[in-house]
Image (cartoon, rainbow, N blue to C red):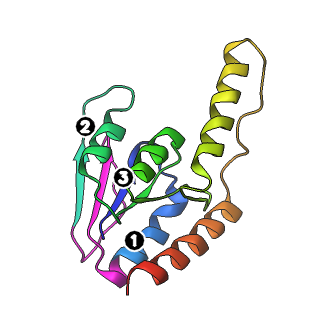
Amino acid sequence: MKLYIDGDAFPNLLKPIVLRSIERLSLPTIVVSNKKIKLGKSATPITYLIVEQGADEADHRIVEMVEEGDLVITADIPLADRIISKNAHAIDHRGELYSVDNIKQYLAMRNLMEEIRDSGEMTRGPKPFGQKDAHQFANQLHRFLTKYCK
């Protein structure tokens, strides 16, 4: 299994959590973004790919590279849907594990909210990312890696 990180909106609070997992499992990791970001120092090599600027360029690259059984960390629901369709796995920054059973529901809700915003309605965005979210992410990542990295 390889770990892919959609780096463009990756929260700093998650970097040490992911780095510990990469180190503990010697997990091959690829960070894809349209700007330079670093997770931190690691004895396990981490590949950093910088793609051209533009909407969804990092997403397209991740989809091209991901293989069945890989894990992608992303908050992008359409990307998660594409990942799930390739029989890979996706976890969002708040610890939600996307699956065949739930991704279409998340995608429908995302599209509905987008339509509401496009019609001029003011909606509240997601609550600010915090320590509780990072904790939920850490727990989900640990459960996932325990199950799939034996």
CA gap between label 3 and label 1 equals 25 Å
Give the residue pinned by disc 3: 86
- Name the residue: 48% across, 83% down: 146
Q: Position of residue 105 (x, y in %)?
A: 66, 44
Q: Quadrant of the N terminus?
A: bottom left
SS at circle 1: helix
**Where in the figure is residue 14, as x and y percent of width and height?**
51, 62
Secondary structure found at label 2: loop
Disc 2 from disc 1: Cα separation:
22 Å
Residue 136: image location, x then y, percent = 65, 67
Whether residue 75 sits left or right of residue 69 in the image: it is right
Residue in the picture at 25% in, 30% down: 52
Q: Amino acid at mark 2?
A: Val
32 horizontally vs 94: left or right = left
Part of the protein shown in magenta: 23-45
The residue that appears at 59% across and 44% down in the rendered structure is 104
- Kindly state the secondary structure of the residue where label 3 is placed: loop
- Closer to the camera: disc 3 or disc 2? 3
Q: In this rendering, is residue 149 above or below 114?
A: below
Residue 34 visible in this rendered orientation of the protein: no
Residue 19's disc is 1
What label does residue 51 carry, if any?
Answer: 2
